[in-house]
Image (spheres, grey):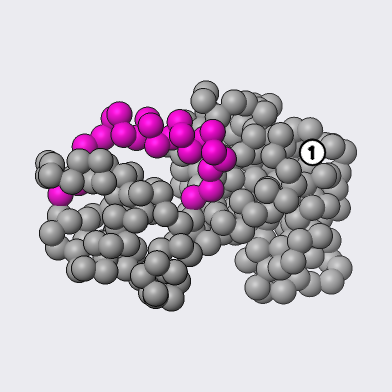
Amino acid sequence: MKTTSPDRPSGSGGPTAPDSGSEASQDDIGVILVDDHPAIRQALHRAVDSACNMRVLGTGGSAAAALPLIEKQRPDVVVVDISLDGLDGLTLTRRIRTRVSDARVLIFSMYDAAAYAQRAVRAGASGYLQKDASLDEVIAAIRTVNEDRIYLSTAARVHVLTALLEESSPPSGVADLTRQEMAVFQMLGEGTEVREIADRLDLSRKTVEAHRRHAKEKLGCESVHDLLRRAILWTRHPSASPSA
């Protein structure tokens, strides 16, 4: 994350970038906000800057305005609305994931999860929230996706997981997993969070994340999203073993 100070909320749709004031800590989560409603940008701006170890690096009211800022600032997390002038938020998400691959995208939209949550995950988003979520939940979601974890509202989770189950096949290669890797893989498939897995297996969170990474590599998964999908499918169909 860049060690720069936050931008000031702006009523215009153009991008705003950090000024030359006080520097942010290198440990802060750098956030860029993309929404075509100035009032929403300002509310999110205040909430993020008020949160511990979190800092706004800039804002934009459109994809065209925000993308150059994102490429320059290279934030940890980008909060993106779907409904934007010009390029929509899902197209922007795909471009962010291509051009700034380390940045995580959290979709913050007025649209119902049933219509867009699955499409957002397909586009590369790490999280989906509707705009009726509290600001506290937005902050929690930013922290979650910054840790390379998926954050979905309850409604979004149901639609995304159901769609994945309907379209995919169970994975092969689980026989190559160690006992603890298999335990982590199975619990992921059951919807258990990393912190709870660590508690249940009496392991540190870092150890659980290492087992998850090893399982991802052994199964040839390209991302944590892919590993989660395969874990869910294997939990539903443990006896099947078609090609992954």
Task: Pick the quarter of the image with the N terminus.
Answer: bottom right
Task: Pick the quarter of the image with the C terminus.
Answer: top left
Q: Which residue is mark 1?
A: 40
Residue occupying the point 52% across, 35% down: 156
Q: Nearer the viewer, residue 169 or 204?
A: 204
Q: Is residue 140 magenta?
A: no
Q: Is residue 96 above or below residue 130?
A: below
Q: Position of residue 146 (x, y in %)?
A: 56, 59
Identify the secondary structure beneath mark 1.
helix
Residue occupying the point 71% across, 34% down: 132
Q: Position of residue 150 (x, y in %)?
A: 49, 50
Image side of residue 84 versus residue 237, left or right: right
Q: Nearer the viewer, residue 221 or 6?
A: 221
Q: Position of residue 23 (x, y in %)?
A: 79, 72
Q: Nearer the viewer, residue 72 or 52?
A: 52
Q: Is residue 204 above or below residue 186?
A: below
The residue carrying pointer 1 sits among few (fewer than 14), some (14 to 19) or many (20 or more) residues within 10 Å by Cα, namely some
The span picked out in magenta is 150-172
The furthest residue to the top: 115
Q: Nearer the viewer, residue 6 or 114?
A: 114
Total labels: the figure holds 1
Say whether residue 93 is visible. Answer: no
Image side of residue 120 versus residue 244, left or right: right
Q: Is residue 162 magenta?
A: yes
Q: Amino acid at mark 1?
A: Ile
Image side of residue 166 versus residue 157, left or right: left
Say whether residue 134 is visible. Answer: yes
Q: Position of residue 142 (x, y in %)?
A: 63, 54
